[in-house]
Amino acid sequence: MEIERKFLIDRFPDLPELMSAKVWQGYLSTAPVVRIRRAELSDGSERFEMTVKGKGTLVRAEVNIDITAEQYYEMEPLLTRELIFKDYHVYDLGNGLRLECSIVDGDTDHGFSYAEVEFDSVEAAHAFVPPACLGREVTEVPGFSMNSYWRNGRIVLD
């Protein structure tokens, strides 16, 4: 189960960085969500995974499955669009919380930046007071998801 809140950001925060990665991801399906991802971690290693996500915003089912590089590269040609690129950084918020920040597709016309914070409970998620570095909350905004970005090629916020 995944419990997370999402926020827009203008820049990476001035917080202790725990790790960073260059990430490429694509969607084999958007209903249900089935995503493959390749990450080049800051320590020089690579990680490959497939993720299946259920419906929901604040709370939803999520299953992450480690896959081999060979499996990833066998599935990549099945994608119907170009991979999404993320410049991904994780920061320490204290109290065991991590702030996961992504610049999506860089400085393209459709690119954007956002952050996520995952929680152990719905109560903890509701009690969270966002730091000043976070902008508008988009957890419950229709269409604000990476699979919507994949389907539509952009994020539209009113």
Image: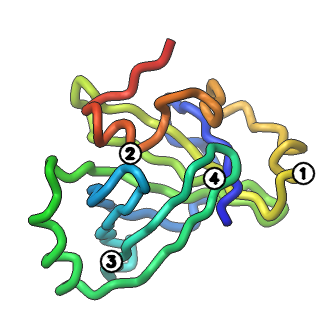
Q: Is residue 122 above or below residue 120?
A: above
Place of residue 46 in the rendered image (x, y in percent of width and height, measured from the top left): 31, 79
Q: Quadrant of residue 100?
A: bottom right
> Which one is closest to the eye, mark 4 or mark 3?
3
Eye-nearest disc, 3 or 2:
2
Secondary element at tag 1: helix
Pointer 2 with pointer 4, Cβ within 8 A: no
Q: Earlier in the sequence, mark 3 or mark 2?
A: 3
Foreground residue among 15 and 28 = 28
Identity of the residue drawn at 39% across and 78% down: 43
Lower sequence index among marks 4 and 1:
4
Q: Secondary structure at mark 4?
A: strand
- Mark 4 vs mark 1: in front: 1
Q: Position of residue 9 (x, y in %)?
A: 54, 32
Quadrant of the rendered image containing residue 71: bottom left
Q: How is the image coloured?
A: rainbow
Query: Mark 1 Cα within 10 Å, few/some/many (few <14, many 20+)?
Result: few
Q: Is residue 136 above or below residue 67?
A: above
Amino acid type, residue under disc 1 in the picture: Glu
Left or right, residue 25 beside residue 91? left
Query: Can you identify the residue that label 3 sits on?
Result: 48
Q: Which circle, 2 or 4, is nearer the viewer?
A: 2
Q: Residues within 10 Å of mark 2 (few under 14, many from 20)?
A: some
Q: Which residue is mark 4?
A: 99
Q: Which residue is mark 2?
A: 147
| Residue carrying label 1 | 123
Identity, as a three-letter code, of the amino acid under mark 2: Asn
CA gap, disc 2 and disc 4: 20 Å
SS for callout 3: strand
Gap in Å between the C-alphas at discs 4 and 3?
21 Å
Which numbered dot is residue 55?
A: none
